[in-house]
Amino acid sequence: RKAFTPLMNGKQALIIPTHSVPEFKTLEKLGKCDEKIVCGTNLLFPELEHASIWKLPATIENYQNCILMGVGWGYYSNRTSFYTRICYHMILDKKRLHAVRDRYTWNKLREIGIHNVLYTGCPTMWNLTPEFCKSIPQEKGRCVVATLTEYEADESADSFMLKILCSNYERVYMWPQGKNDEKYILSLVNGKDNIHLLDRSMEAFEEILKEPSIDYVGTRLHAGIMAVNAGKRTLIIATDSRAKEIGKDTNLPVIYREKVKETLENKIGEKFEIKIDMPFKNIEMWKQQFVS
């Protein structure tokens, strides 16, 4: 919303969720919208007839001419079904430029014949200019805020991460982003006295990021991107294709979870610079189609 609001020229926004099928009245309003901007970092699925987090109605007429904004492919896949190809060709605008979060998604869309696509990275990273990145600390802070993801649990790797954080930082703040994260975190803590559990609210996370000497380490991708945007030294533990592909394309500081035991402690201890590489020309090209 922050990225797109300056382009709206005072127009009103109608926010429609993608994780549930809209009501009939909402669908009618959708059909009358001037622009239909689709967001969702892992929204596109290769076999819509079997599974999708984008919940579409039986009739998708009102979804025609949607424009992607930083949207990504849900997971690694070898093929895209014929049904899915037809759906995306019906829904996605054939003339306007689509913005996708990584080059993997860019390739997947081009494979199915959708070529009016730009790799722009995730809109949550569009403000991470080289000048801004120079202001991010390069050396370890005194404290750390960390996250773990209950539905991507790996008790061995996650327990190791907590052990390393406790031995390298004065205080470890755990932020339970998901509704089941707190229970999972508590099952791993085992009385470690320098771990402090935060409230689940976004406000609690934003407040801890205001601390002057605090790093971020964790499995929650966008919590990590929020930390970078807050000017914090950050390490993201990649558990899925989103973090891996964004890390590859943008130089976001990512450690693959399968390499945590080999690399995490050394990475925490070493001095490193966060140098995000964003395709700013593509981002501007995508924005300009709304300005004109």
Image: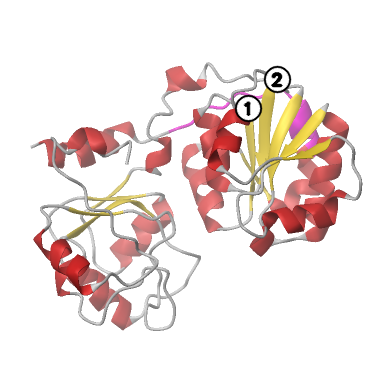
Q: Are marks 2 and 1 in contact (CB under 8 Å)?
A: yes
Q: Main secondary structure of the magenta part?
A: loop
Percent of width and height locating residue 203: 55, 36
Secondary structure under the numbered disc 2 in the rendered image: loop
Percent of width and height locating residue 158: 78, 52
Type of amino acid at the residue the image marks with label 1: Arg
**Residue 45's mark?**
none
Is any atom of residue 108 visible in this view?
Answer: yes
Q: Is residue 114 left or right of residue 76?
A: left
Question: Which residues, given as a range, are shown in magenta?
Answer: 265-277
Secondary structure under the numbered disc 1 in the rendered image: loop
Type of amino acid at the residue the image marks with label 2: Glu
- The residue at 42%/61% (across/down) is 73
**Which residue corresponds to mark 1?**
233
Q: Is residue 268 inside the magenta stretch? A: yes
Q: Quadrant of the C terminus?
A: top left
The picture quadrant where one finds residue 197 is: top right
Q: CA distance from mark 2 to mark 1?
A: 8 Å
- The residue at 62%/58% (across/down) is 179
